[in-house]
Amino acid sequence: AQTVTQSQPEMSVQEAETVTLSCTYDTSENNYYLFWYKQPPSRQMILVIRQEAYKQQNATENRFSVNFQKAAKSFSLKISDSQLGDTAMYFCAFMPPPNYGQNFVFGPGTRLSVLP
Amino acid sequence: DTGVSQNPRHKITKRGQNVTFRCDPISEHNRLYWYRQTLGQGPEFLTYFQNEAQLEKSRLLSDRFSAERPKGSFSTLEIQRTEQGDSAMYLCASSIRLALYNEQFFGPGTRLTVL
């Protein structure tokens, strides 16, 4: 079974600074998908960024980028120029190949606080 | 309304009662998922529908839980004989197949409290 680990339960960063959230996962599969979701306080989860395992190039979405290390099974999220609106729970999620079904496996989350 | 909606948003019930939650996915999405999220944890997969067919069920979905998606539109999740351990946020998500993966769009959740 796949597992996702996020070793930082809580983090804080000053506004405009850069922060990196860690995620490691365990799988024996070669093809899969990785995601970072954001869950603001009392609001629904939204997708931040996704990465296909067969792509070597790290995904980037505006201020958000990932460092995908397939051999190390590591998938960290970097947030540049942090904004107060980035305050949220961040979940790393793994999706197995289609023949394993469509359900996500989520990590326990990292609570990020952006300080003014 | 272009997002996933869930009703009710909050439900308080007494142990042993039955509860039912509803999820309305994004209209063109043919896939629908239910997750359970307890405090301080990430969502845990419960079950998945493609159209009206329930294709996957987690071992977390005990025989007290049942989910339906009649006509492949909205879905309901029923919990019978609720227990205090059922207290959690129940999340619904929907998606549509695009290439080999599909982004799941989440609803706001239904928070269940069992007294």
Image (spheres, rainbow, N blue to C red):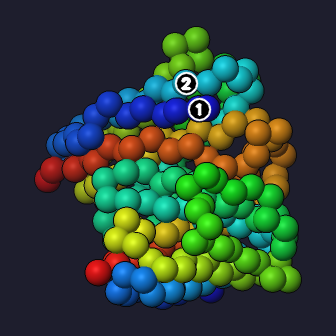
Question: In the structure shown, which secondary structural element does the residue marked by tag 1 occupy?
Answer: loop
> Which residue is drawn at the image coordinates 49% and 62% (left, top)?
B36
Q: Does A14 sit left or right of A94 as displayed? A: left
Q: In the displayed structure, would residue B49 be above or below residue A58?
A: below
Residue B73, x across and y down, in percent: 78, 81
Q: Does B9 sit left or right of A14 as displayed? A: right
Identify the image quadrant of residue B1: bottom right
- Amino acid marked by disc 1: Gln
- Image quadrant for the N terminus of chain A? top right
Residue A68, x across and y down, in percent: 54, 23
Number of residues whose C-alpha sits closer than 10 Å to that of mark 2, classed few (under 14), some (14–19) or many (20 or more): some
Q: Which mark is residue A2?
A: 1
Number of residues whose C-alpha sits closer than 10 Å to that of mark 1, classed few (under 14), some (14–19) or many (20 or more): some
Say which chain tag 1 marks: A
Identify the image quadrant of residue B45: bottom right
Residue contact at pointers 2 and 1, CB within 8 angstroms = yes
> Which residue is drawn at the image coordinates 37% and 65% (left, top)?
B85
Which label's residue is closer to the chain start, 2 or 1?
A: 1
Residue at the spot of label 2: A26
Q: Is residue B81 visible?
A: yes
